[in-house]
Image (tube, helix red, strand yellow):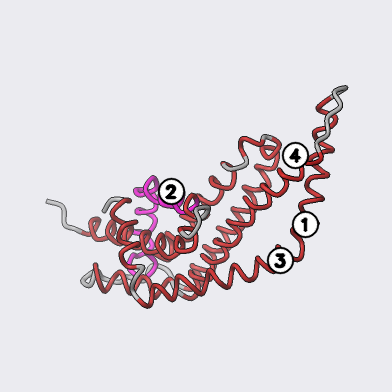
């Protein structure tokens, strides 16, 4: 099962009524929650961030007198936007993982893998721990990458790298937890590492595209499930 085929599968199944509902409500909840935070704090955060940028840039300019006011304020808004978008869709992914992932797994399994044995290698506790590790990893990567935010050309790349890792970490576990045993899960996470990271990166990129970002969590959740269940089925085929 190729990555392209898995993504197309996700798009095709998006029109199912149950999938449409899962597409809408987690994203709306995330947008309303973070939108309220943005309305309350965006302007103050932008001004504070612009002030910090001026403090960093003015000593670097040396004896050259430059007015960084407008430029730093614009840059602050750009940075906040680059952080706001992933916060919204990562929140939607967490909500989707808790309330919708099992429905999506059942949907894909019933349509494409009805004979695939369910070995229940994961569960609710494992899913919660996996979510915690993903969140902690995101925070750690953000803290480690803080010095790189001094380099504006890297601003679009830093959140993409962090989110690509977080996406695959969040989605891969729940995609296989119902059907694979623990050993199969570990083996597939290793053998399919490149593929799931590519899917994670594509989801991170899609989050910034208007409208596509709205449907991306469900499309790529379905794609992860289709890709990994297909790999699991192939791994269980007898070798001659």
Query: Upstream in the sequence, badge 2 or badge 1?
Result: 1
Q: Label 2, on which residue?
A: 197
Q: Is 101 contained in the magenta span?
A: no
Above or below for 214 versus 120: above
Q: Label 3, on which residue?
A: 37
Q: Label 4, on which residue?
A: 71
Query: Upstream in the sequence, badge 2 or badge 3?
Result: 3
Count neighbours of disc 1 (C-alpha within 10 A) and say few if under 14, some if 14 to 19, many if 20 or more. Answer: some
Residue 224 is situated, as x and y percent measured from the top left of the image, at 38, 59
Query: Upstream in the sequence, badge 4 or badge 1?
Result: 1
Residue located at (36% from left, 77% from top): 17
Residue located at (49% from left, 68% from top): 127
Q: Is 191 contained in the magenta span?
A: yes
Query: Contact (CB < 8 A) between labels 2 and 1?
Result: no
Residue located at (64% from left, 52% from top): 81
Query: Upstream in the sequence, badge 3 or badge 1?
Result: 3
Q: Label 1, on which residue?
A: 43
Q: CA distance from mark 2 to mark 1?
A: 35 Å
Residue 138 is situated, as x and y percent measured from the top left of the image, at 60, 53
Residues in magenta, as a range: 176-204
Q: CA distance from mark 3 to mark 1?
A: 11 Å
Query: Contact (CB < 8 A) between labels 4 and 2?
Result: no
Q: CA distance from mark 2 to mark 3?
A: 30 Å
Q: Secondary structure at mark 3?
A: helix
Classify residue 5 as left or right of residue 166: left
Closer-to-camera residue (101/177): 101
Residue located at (24% from left, 68% from top): 113
């Amino acid at each position: 099962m190729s990555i392209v085929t898995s993504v197309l599968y996700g798009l095709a199944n998006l029109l199912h009524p149950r999938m449409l509902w899962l597409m809408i409500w987690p994203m709306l909840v995330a947008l309303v929650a973070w939108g309220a935070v943005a309305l309350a704090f965006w302007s103050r955060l932008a001004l504070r961030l612009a002030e910090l940028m001026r403090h960093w840039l003015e000593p670097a300019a040396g004896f050259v007198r430059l007015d960084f006011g407008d430029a730093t304020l614009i840059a602050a808004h750009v940075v906040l936007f680059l952080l706001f978008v992933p916060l919204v869709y990562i929140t939607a992914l967490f909500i989707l993982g808790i309330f919708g992932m099992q429905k999506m797994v059942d949907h894909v399994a019933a349509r494409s893998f009805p004979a695939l044995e369910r070995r229940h290698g994961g569960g609710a506790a494992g899913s919660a721990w996996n979510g915690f590790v993903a969140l902690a990893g995101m925070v750690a990567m953000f803290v480690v990458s803080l010095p790189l935010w001094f380099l504006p050309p890297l601003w679009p790349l830093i959140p993409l790298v962090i989110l690509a890792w977080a996406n695959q970490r969040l989605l891969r576990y729940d995609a296989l937890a119902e059907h694979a045993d623990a050993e199969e899960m570990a083996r597939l996470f290793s053998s399919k590492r490149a593929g799931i990271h590519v899917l994670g990166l594509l989801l991170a990129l899609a989050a910034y595209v208007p409208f596509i970002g709205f449907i991306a969590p469900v499309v790529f959740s379905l794609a992860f499930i289709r890709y990994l269940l297909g790999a699991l089925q192939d791994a269980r085929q007898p070798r001659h």
